[in-house]
Image (cartoon, rainbow, N blue to C red):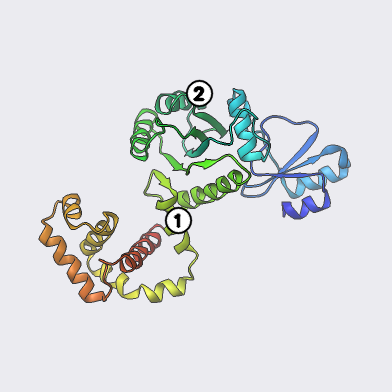
Amino acid sequence: MLLKLQQKYPQARLHKVPPSEEDPETLWLTDEANEEFLAIPKHLLTQSEIDLLCSLFSEAAPSGNWNNDTLESRSWHDYLYDGMPLREDVSPKDHYRVIQFAIKENVENDLLKEAFRSIFAEQAVIVFTSSGTGAIVEKQTEWSLPEEELLSAAAVIEGDFFVSPTFFIGRFYAINDRFPSFFKEEKNLFSFAEKNISKDRVFTFPSTFPSFVLHYVPKQTKTSMFADIIQLFAEDEELKKTIKTYLENQSNTSQTAKVLFMHRNSVQYRIDKFIEKIGIDIKTFQGALTVYLACLEIEQEITE
């Protein structure tokens, strides 16, 4: 709807984030989901047009970009969320990743900033888009935070502030014309993960993409193709747990037994039982992938 309105006012600009501060020269409108924001210069509008547009759309409230209190954080905010050029002192030879974060509960951004500063390397740039949401821009160095440590950090933040943080660890990319589009796709994946993979705290491209792809397979196709697996797992929850754990541990029987506190022979028996009943050899890559997608589909059904 806002896109059609932009066509009527070509000088208007469509944004993915609200204004950072009060802008008396611009009329900011947003859609029902607050996912897009249209900025129309007021000199293009009559008072009657302003009144009409405000009755049809909601005015967008400022996000308070004063939280981005450094030149670096404001520059990255405008680059990532507003499509503005990045500061010239950022070398195109360097690689950066964006770690998105979201906290639904109320927490002061200044306290979050202190917590992030104690977790990430000093050169990491913390960018806020609203209270409790934003991104951490990290340059690729030998001190870049591993995924396991971020998982531990999420647990620390959860305990210290009594909140439930979620993170999406982006991949490292060179700063070029493609960086904004990569970030846009990672934003879409994070949004999908928050809505559909609620059990996790830290998401990545590999951990999210299979569920994302599966989500767009026609429902009838999934129901038909996975019917026998779904029925078997419904009858034997322990078998489902064993098979999924086996697949998530690189099809390693010994590691699966260790995770599940089972004897290795018991794990192997269940694997053989599954292969015999379903007729899909999960010891092959193709078989493992097919059954893992079935496991993800069952979990998505439960969350829905």
Asked if residue 129 shows in the view, the reply is: yes
Q: Which mark is residue 227?
A: none
Instruction: Name above or below for residue 42 compared with residue 55.
Output: above
Residue 70 in picture, x, y percent from top left: 59, 23
Asked if residue 64 shows in the view, the reply is: no
Residue farthest front in this picture? 93
Instruction: Give, as a three-letter code, the residue at label 1.
Output: Phe
Q: Quadrant of the N terminus?
A: bottom right
Residue 271 in picture, x, y percent from top left: 19, 66
Residue at left 26%, top 76%?
279
Residue at left 78%, top 31%?
24
Residue 206 in picture, x, y percent from top left: 41, 52
Q: Tell me the distance, in whole angstroms, between the alpha carbons under discs 1 and 2.
A: 33 Å
Q: Secondary structure at mark 2?
A: helix
Few, some or many C-alpha atoms within 10 Å of disc 1 (few <14, some 14-19, many ≥20)? some
Q: Secondary structure at mark 1?
A: helix
Q: Is residue 44 left or right of residue 55?
A: right
Query: Which one is in front, 284 or 208?
Result: 284
Say which of marks 1 and 2 sits in front: 1
Residue 291 in picture, x, y percent from top left: 32, 67
Residue at left 42%, top 59%?
210
Q: Is residue 75 left or right of residue 218?
A: right
Q: Which residue is mark 1?
A: 209
Q: Quadrant of the C terminus?
A: bottom left
Few, some or many C-alpha atoms within 10 Å of disc 2 (few <14, some 14-19, many ≥20)? few
- Marks 1 and 2 in Cβ contact (< 8 Å): no
Q: Earlier in the sequence, mark 1 or mark 2?
A: 2
Instruction: Give, as a three-letter code, the residue at label 2.
Output: Asp
Instruction: Name above or below for residue 116 compared with residue 240.
Output: above
| Residue 148: quarter of image | top left
Q: Which residue is mark 2?
A: 110
